[in-house]
């Protein structure tokens, strides 16, 4: 017993050894079982894991317990969280009707809808009535001339007396017709001091842009209005834009800065000479010159299309310029040839002076078969190929003098005689409308004209029976003037936004001009 005590309690306390024997007889055993149980509980508590890893042993007892714990904690947190309901506060008591009306009279909000209360607020003692409000000494105004508006009307609307407005219109009209002043023109004016309120203010100053290149100023000096003209220097160098056609001619030209109207004019001009779009390739280059004015004050004005060029990578390049011929303005090629449609083109524009068939020859002095027609044309008029073909013959051909024969395929040949100059070589292919020579009087000829023959399968046929297309052509002094204008136009530098392409296009232009 004591041994047990000794072992179990050891030198626990001296008191145990002194305790009465009877009472302590069971004590060691009691203490022993209680201690063991506590020990077990402590063990279990240590093993009891409140924070179960829910990622492990899913479905096990511990996991379920951990899940319930977690859920419980979440629920507890949620149930303890404060709500988001509005906090109760004090609400002002609604005003009685009479007080509400009183408040509404002086409130700002109702004024936004107009004073609808009809309540008059009486002036207080702080208010000092004025006998007359002071007038501004001068008034600066801006007036705009509308479409269909009268110049004098604008001034009158601004407060100028009718007589003075008429006088101003007369002064301006001496320089620029007032009807020519563009709608939208903004006029700056100054109205001066008036002697009393019963009369209109005098016009002290009026300034506006009367024309693109002219600014006018009316100013009162010594009681009378005087006009001053201020010219605005204008650079009217045309705008030249070139570029690659690419996928879409329209889009490429627009991207290069050509105004849409000019692109449309350009396409219409090209359509007189070739089929659109099949006649244009993506690697062709467009060359567009547009009338353009740039004022020193910075404004620019873009005008009509002046020149339409197309440098084609394969085949004939086009250089088109507008020209008035026979009272009609139309597009002409650099060689002076205008629009042509279907069939054969006339080699020269002149009429027939001698027909096909038997006739008396003026030089040979006897009747013989005239194998073709003689067409009236002055010396040096360009002769063009009537259809696409290949040069079969080019040189001296007996009585025909300098002559060219073209083979158009399908057994059709055309002959051109009495030329002063031949512009093609044998074997060269030509396109319809291309210059092949100039009118002359070589060979057996009494004067400048074109002898023209059409052969079908080696037999001369009446050229007048063939389908000719009508076309316009510029000739003589008119052609020289046309070419001079074209040359000066082609001297236009390419626009600033085209600088990087300048070198390449210059080369192309030179090739065409040759
Ligand atoms: Zn003839």
Image (spheres, rainbow, N blue to C red):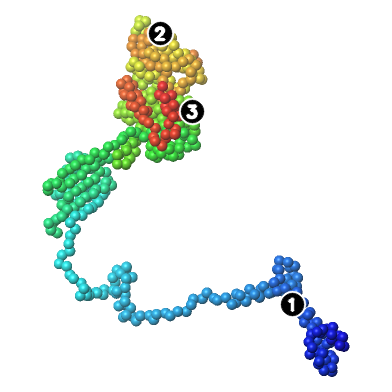
- Which of labels 3 and 1 is toward the front? 1
Residue 213: x, y in percent? 26, 39
Cα separation between marks 1 and 2: 136 Å
Quarter of the rendering containing residue 139: bottom left
Cα separation between marks 3 and 1: 96 Å
Q: Is mark 3 within 8 Å of ligand 1?
A: no
Q: Residues within 10 Å of mark 3 (few under 14, many from 20)?
A: few
Residue 229 in sight: yes
For the point 40% across and 40% down, the residue is 260
Residue 273 in sight: no
Circle number at residue 313: 3
Residue at image mark 2:
399
> In the picture provided, is 434 more to the left or to the right than 1?
left
Q: Earlier in the sequence, mark 3 or mark 2?
A: 3
Q: Earlier in the sequence, mark 1 or mark 2?
A: 1
Q: Provide the secondary structure element on which disc 1 rests.
A: helix
For the point 47% across and 17% down, the residue is 391
Is residue 350 placed above or below 442 in the rendered structure?
Answer: below
For the point 41% across and 37% down, the residue is 497
As drawn, the residue found furthest toward the top would be 365
> In the picture provided, is 249 more to the left or to the right than 224?
right
- Image marks 3 and 2: residues in contact by CB distance under 8 Å: no
């Amino acid at each position: 017993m004591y041994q047990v005590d000794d072992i179990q309690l050891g030198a626990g306390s001296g008191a145990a050894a002194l305790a009465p024997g009877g009472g302590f007889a069971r004590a060691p055993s009691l203490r022993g079982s209680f201690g063991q149980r506590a020990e077990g509980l402590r063990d279990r508590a240590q093993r009891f894991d409140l924070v179960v890893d829910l990622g492990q042993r899913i479905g096990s007892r511990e996991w379920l317990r951990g899940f319930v714990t977690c859920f419980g904690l979440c629920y507890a947190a949620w149930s303890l969280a404060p709500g988001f309901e509005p906090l109760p506060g004090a609400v002002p008591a609604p005003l009685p009707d009479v007080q509400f009306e009183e408040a509404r009279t002086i409130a700002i909000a109702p004024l936004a809808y107009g004073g609808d209360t009809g309540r008059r607020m009486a002036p207080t003692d702080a208010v000092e009535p004025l006998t007359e409000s002071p007038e501004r000494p001068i008034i600066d105004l801006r007036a705009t001339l509308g479409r269909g508006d009268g110049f004098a009307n604008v001034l009158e609307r601004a407060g100028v007396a009718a007589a003075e407005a008429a006088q101003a219109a007369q002064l301006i009209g001496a320089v620029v017709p007032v009807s020519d002043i563009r709608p939208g023109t903004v006029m700056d004016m100054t109205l001066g001091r008036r002697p009393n309120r019963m009369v209109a203010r005098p016009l002290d100053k009026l300034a506006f842009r009367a024309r693109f290149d002219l600014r006018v100023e009316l100013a009162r000096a010594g009681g009378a209005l005087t006009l001053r003209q201020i010219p605005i220097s204008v650079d009217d160098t045309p705008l030249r834009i070139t570029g690659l056609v690419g996928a879409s001619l329209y889009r490429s030209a627009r991207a290069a800065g050509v105004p849409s109207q000019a692109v449309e004019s350009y396409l219409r001009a090209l359509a007189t000479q070739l089929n659109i779009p099949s006649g244009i390739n993506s690697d062709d280059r467009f060359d567009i010159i547009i009338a353009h004015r740039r004022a020193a004050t910075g404004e620019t004005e873009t005008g009509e299309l002046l020149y339409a060029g197309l440098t084609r990578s394969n085949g004939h390049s086009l250089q088109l310029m507008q020209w008035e011929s026979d009272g009609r303005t139309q597009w002409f090629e650099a060689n002076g040839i205008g629009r042509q449609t279907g069939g054969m083109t006339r080699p020269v524009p002149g009429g027939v002076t001698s027909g096909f068939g038997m006739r008396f020859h003026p030089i040979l002095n006897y009747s013989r078969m005239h194998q073709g027609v003689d067409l009236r044309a002055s010396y040096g008029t360009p002769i063009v190929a009537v259809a696409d073909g290949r040069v079969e013959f080019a040189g001296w051909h007996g009585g025909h003098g300098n002559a060219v024969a073209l083979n158009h395929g399908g057994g059709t040949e055309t002959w051109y005689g009495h030329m002063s100059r031949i512009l093609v070589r044998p074997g060269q292919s030509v396109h319809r409308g291309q210059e092949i020579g100039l009118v002359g009087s070589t060979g057996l000829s009494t004067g400048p004209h074109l002898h023209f023959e059409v052969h079908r399968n080696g037999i001369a046929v009446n050229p007048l029976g063939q389908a000719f297309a009508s076309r316009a052509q510029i000739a003589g002094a008119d052609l020289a003037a046309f070419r001079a204008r074209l040359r000066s136009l082609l001297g236009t530098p390419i626009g600033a936004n085209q600088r990087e392409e300048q070198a390449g296009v210059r080369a192309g232009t030179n090739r065409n001009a040759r």
